[in-house]
Image (cartoon, grey):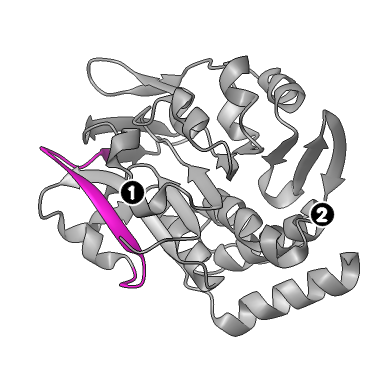
Amino acid sequence: MTAIDYLLLGHITADITPDGRKLGGTVSYAAPIANSFNHRVGVVTGAAACEPLLANLDENIRLSVRASKATTTFENIYPPNASRVQYIHALASPIEYDDVPVGWVNAPLVHLAPLVAEIAPEIVHKFADASVMVTPQGWLRKWDAEGKVSFKRWFDADVLSKVDIIVFSKHDVLAAPEMEYEFAGAVKHCLVTDGANGGIYYFDGVPTNFPPHLVEEVDPTGAGDVFASSLLSSLPLLDHNMHAAIRVAARLAAISVTHPGVYTFSPEEVEQAIRDARQEFL
């Protein structure tokens, strides 16, 4: 297959909603973002054979799909006056390094986006020459026999030593908030998002707060994925200045929540965000 710039590994999902099955999953939100930065994007995923939701991804995004008996399927239930309850109803096959097309293995930007532990953490050792970013949600989940999801503690110092950037939200580690500092001490660039409060960037364990872009929220779904993908996508365009890339990522994530569903950025929106960050930080 044709060489790519931005490699994404993770399951697409079928999300059960009142309006039917919807395309979801980190790769589904992140791939269009990387594509909007003019990166050549390759997605390695797993899904049921002939999964119709795959057709919702932009035709410019290259796909390598491990055919499975099912597509990973989530359902979110929001009881009155209670926290969200999440269920996993089906799982696609795990993704292995051998599923990555030969022409994609040397991609300079690699985004590992597990949702249901479908990627073994040790795969990071296969991308020694890339800038590797992890959004670790799927390594922080477990589920019971009925599919009900709960938090799982995960920390692997050997794996994390090979990760360049880790991005997660305060909510991801709500059950074990001390993990924020554990990750920050293990990964050179650790970013913790906190919705309308902005977030914290840890560089070698030293924290710096970054502000939010205040907007009127319509749909927050996927905002963290937009932030992470915008961050990694913009770094090569900003001389790898992390503060400038954070500014771009926060801006685009804010724009994304003002629209329902997966939002496709125009070239002008991306170019303006890059231009403004460059003027401020470079």
Residue at 35% x, 39% y is 76
Task: Look at the numbered disc 2 and give the secondary structure of its residue.
Answer: helix
Q: Is residue 70 magenta?
A: yes
| Residue where numbered disc 2 is placed | 243
Q: Is residue 172 left or right of residue 204?
A: left
* Amino acid beneath label 2: His
Q: CA distance from mark 1 to mark 2?
A: 33 Å
Give the magenta range. 58-73
Query: Pointers 1 and 2 in contact (CB under 8 A)?
Result: no
Percent across and percent down for residue 122 are 46, 23
Number of labels in the image equals: 2
Percent across and percent down for residue 66 are 21, 43
Q: Is residue 256 visible?
A: yes
Residue at 30% x, 39% y is 75
**First along the sequence among labels 1 and 2:** 1
Give residue 102's mark: 1
Percent across and percent down for residue 138 are 43, 30
Q: Is residue 191 left or right of residue 58?
A: right
Residue 203: name its quadrant: top right
Task: Look at the numbered disc 1 and give the secondary structure of its residue.
Answer: helix
